[in-house]
Amino acid sequence: MNSNILQLLILLLAVIVGSTLGIFNLGIESEFILDIAIISLLFSVFLQIPIHSFSSFKSILKYKKYISIAWILNFIIIPTLAFLLALIFFEKNSALFLGVLIYLIAPCTDWVLGFTKKSGGDEVANSLLLPLNLLSQILLLPIYLYLFTGVESLPQIEIMIETLLLWILLPFTLAQIVKIIQSTFFKTNNYIETYSQLLMDISLVVLIIQIFSLNIDTLLYHISAVALVLGVVLIFFIIVYYIVKIISNIWSLSSPLEKSLTMTTAARNAPLMFAISLILFPEMVLIHSVIIIGMLLEFPHLIFLTHILSQK
């Protein structure tokens, strides 16, 4: 079975198990479990990012046009589109509004490389993007939230930045230590690729089961919003796909670079945003649920895109 389909089935199963436990009041409320799972999830995300990819200055120069176009799309055009869609379909500053916004504004920093390779895109081009995407989304997230929502519904920006630094710096540092040990004592990176993905899947499963088992009543009450969220995310994916085609034609991007641009703009950083939403908005379960819903739609979308692009 395709690994991406298997990952999707695992996430669906986690939703079913969590919901079942919640219906029978068998959920276990534990801040310790949540904290460990969040740190593990962040650690696994950072472990998969090739920070060394910016070490080749020649590579950066070779792809400078692509990197510039991708950054503008991912951090100016797409966040603006995400805000407009959230504003059209949801009440401003509601949990659904924030959930859709947080999910859509962050480009992927992990599984996008696998989809890029399978679609026939330029894997080197997107590997150069990953460290920049990671740094940009972490630094810009507080700015986006204040710019698009205002200050009344959010933590103080100083507290937000301090919280992000506290939670992100530890797993990021641990990930880099592990990668240094890996490169020093082992000749292959297969260990990191294999176990970081496994750790991410386990962490996501634990968090999803926790969210659904403890909040199933709230989620069932808002079940009608699920279809609307799915619709908005689907509209977003369609619009972004055609924006990429237009920009690729305007800038005469090669076929591999167009495929790479399609993937980096289609893949969202759901695991990282899921963890951050749990940190910044621990009581707003609808935000967490929206990101999970987006993730469940994103996998079939990326699999479909990969199939279509690989035929070209």
Image (tube, rainbow, N blue to C red):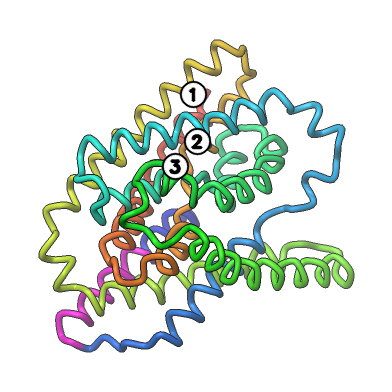
Q: Secondary structure at mark 2?
A: helix
Is residue 17 one of those drawn in magenta?
yes
Sooner in the amino-acid sequence: mark 2 or mark 3: 2
The answer to whether mark 2 and mark 1 are in CB contact below 8 A is: yes
Q: Which amino acid is tagged 1?
A: Val
Is residue 207 one of those drawn in magenta?
no
The answer to whether mark 2 and mark 3 are in CB contact below 8 A is: no
**Residue drawn where x is 26% and y is 56% of the image:** 95
Front-most of residues 190 and 30: 30
Q: Where is mark 3, residue-wise?
A: 302
Front-most of residues 263 and 109: 109
**Residue drawn where x is 41% and y is 29% of the image:** 240
Q: Where is mark 1, residue-wise?
A: 244
Residue 131 lies left or right of residue 45; in this view the side is right
Q: Which mark is residue 265?
A: 2
Q: Secondary structure at mark 1?
A: helix
**Residue drawn where x is 79% and y is 44% of the image:** 54
The answer to whether mark 3 and mark 1 are in CB contact below 8 A is: no
Spatial separation of the CA atoms under disc 3 and disc 1: 15 Å
The location of residue 276, given as percent across then percent down, is 47, 63
Q: Secondary structure at mark 3?
A: helix
Spatial separation of the CA atoms under disc 2 and disc 3: 11 Å
Q: Is residue 57 above or below residue 177?
A: above
Sooner in the amino-acid sequence: mark 3 or mark 1: 1
The location of residue 117, given as percent across then percent down, is 62, 40
Q: Which amino acid is tagged 3?
A: Leu
**Which residues, given as a range, are shown in magenta?**
11-25
Residue 286 lies left or right of residue 2; in this view the side is left
Spatial separation of the CA atoms under disc 2 and disc 1: 8 Å
Q: Is residue 29 above or below residue 124?
A: below
